[in-house]
């Protein structure tokens, strides 16, 4: 019986290793080694065929070394601890007493143990890892005198090594104490030393490798504080990014032609006089309308600080060209002075210049047309 169980255990262990090797060969990529070990904790379930030997307590009256075989089922619950449920079995031949000449008798007793063992590991997953173990079990005794259950416990240690993605080996030794008090009426409790070798075969697909950590994307810049093309419109509101430097743009950041219309700012005939500085005395009635137009022009220039204008004055056709030239220059100058006195920097103003009676916009043959020609213009420099 003992040989049949041992042969079964060896076949089971070799079959498990073969299955694990086949699984690793199939799953590994073409450029990976089939013997490459896993690099981190693997929580898959495994089976653990085991074969080992006892050095028996002398009180058992049996030869001191016996083979045992078993099978465990368990998993790692974290990188440094595993728990196995197991069953193992041994059969011991009883010794003849001295009166019977010693040696083995024809009688034997067997033990079947069912229990659980926790193992506690140290070191890197892929290295030879030392561990300690503690286990509790029930031990079923069967012999010529009696049969029944008794509690048992074990303590020990060993070393383990991961040899592939789905297989480990472990070698362990320890002490197992059996509280059997029935096998021999005059004896109670047996302590046996044991040595075991197991092949761990994990089953199921290996866990996928953890995805590489991705650095968090930097927080997007606040576009309301940025003006990439320096056109005075923040990037959130700019619908025409990358406009050329110096381009006049509107509130949406798109190119815009600025027109400053002074139509409505008309002068009285032959005004201003030389040396006259109060513009309101020179403006056509109603004066307030012309002042309102001038103030709108000031507001436009303040809203578009990049805009430069030429201040140009004109007259109607009455009078000589020389006189009209001087009169147009005075009209340009008095508007120029009005703008600078209301906060417009002189560096943004070209002139003042006069054009006399040239470029009329009204008919000089009528009073209304001549009134239109007595004007000043702000000509935007694009």
Image (cartoon, rainbow, N blue to C red):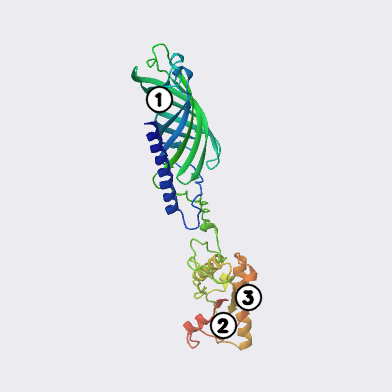
Quadrant of the snapshot with the C terminus: bottom right
- Residue at 46 percent of width and 18 percent of height: 102
Q: What crowding class fits label 1: few (fewer than 14 Cα within 10 Å), some (14-19), or many (20 or more)?
A: many
Which of the 4 image quarters holds residue 90?
A: top left
- Residue at 38 percent of width and 25 percent of height: 111
Is residue 50 at least partly visible in the picture?
yes
Query: Which mark is nearer the camera, 3 or 2?
Result: 3
Q: What crowding class fits label 3: few (fewer than 14 Cα within 10 Å), some (14-19), or many (20 or more)?
A: some
Is residue 206 at least partly visible in the picture?
no
- Measure the alpha-carbon separation of dots 2 and 1: 120 Å
Nearer the observer, 337 or 93: 93
Image-based side of 279 in relation to 29, left or right:
right
Query: Which mark is nearer the camera, 2 or 1?
Result: 1
Which residue is tagged 1?
137
Which residue is tagged 2?
315
Which residue is tagged 3?
350
- Measure the alpha-carbon separation of dots 3 and 2: 19 Å
- Measure the alpha-carbon separation of dots 3 and 1: 106 Å
Nearer the observer, 319 or 110: 110
- Residue at 45 percent of width and 39 percent of height: 199
Residue 317's x, y, as percent?
A: 55, 87
Mark positioned earlier in the residue sequence (3 or 1):
1
Image-based side of 345 in relation to 186, left or right:
right
- Residue at 48 percent of width and 62 percent of height: 237
């Amino acid at each position: 019986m003992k040989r049949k169980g041992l042969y079964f255990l060896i076949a089971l262990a070799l079959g498990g290793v073969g299955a694990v090797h086949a699984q690793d060969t199939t799953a590994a990529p073409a450029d990976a080694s089939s013997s490459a070990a896993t690099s981190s904790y693997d929580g898959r379930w495994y089976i653990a065929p085991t074969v080992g030997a006892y050095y028996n307590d002398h009180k058992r009256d049996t030869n001191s070394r016996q083979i045992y075989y078993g099978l465990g089922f368990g998993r790692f619950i974290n990188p440094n601890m595993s728990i196995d449920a197991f069953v193992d079995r041994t059969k011991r031949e009883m010794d003849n007493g001295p009166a019977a000449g010693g040696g083995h008798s024809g009688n034997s007793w067997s033990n079947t143990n069912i229990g659980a063992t926790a193992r506690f590991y140290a070191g890197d997953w892929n290295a030879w890892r030392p561990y300690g173990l503690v286990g509790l079990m029930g031990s079923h005794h069967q012999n010529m005198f009696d049969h029944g259950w008794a509690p048992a416990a074990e303590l020990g240690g060993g070393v383990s090594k991961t040899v592939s993605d789905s297989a480990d080996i472990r070698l362990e030794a320890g002490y197992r104490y059996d509280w059997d008090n029935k096998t021999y009426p005059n004896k109670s409790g047996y302590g046996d030393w044991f040595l075991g070798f197991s092949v761990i075969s994990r089953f199921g697909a290996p866990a996928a490798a953890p995805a590489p950590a991705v650095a968090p994307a930097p927080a997007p810049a606040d576009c309301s504080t940025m003006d990439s093309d320096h056109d005075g419109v923040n990037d959130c509101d700019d619908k025409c990014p990358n406009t050329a430097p110096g381009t006049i743009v509107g509130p949406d950041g798109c190119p815009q032609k600025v027109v400053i219309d002074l139509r409505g700012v008309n002068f009285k005939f032959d005004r201003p006089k030389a040396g006259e500085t109060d513009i309101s005395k020179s403006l056509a009635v109603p004066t307030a309308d012309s002042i309102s137009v001038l103030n709108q022009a000031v507001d436009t220039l303040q809203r578009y600080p990049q805009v430069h204008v030429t201040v140009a004055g004109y007259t109607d056709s009455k009078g000589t060209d020389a006189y009209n030239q001087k009169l147009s220059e005075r009209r340009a100058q008095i508007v120029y002075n009005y703008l600078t006195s209301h906060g417009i920097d002189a560096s943004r103003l070209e002139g003042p210049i006069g054009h006399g009676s040239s470029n009329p916009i009204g008919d000089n043959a009528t009073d209304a047309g001549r009134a239109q020609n007595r004007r000043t213009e702000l000509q935007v420099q694009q």
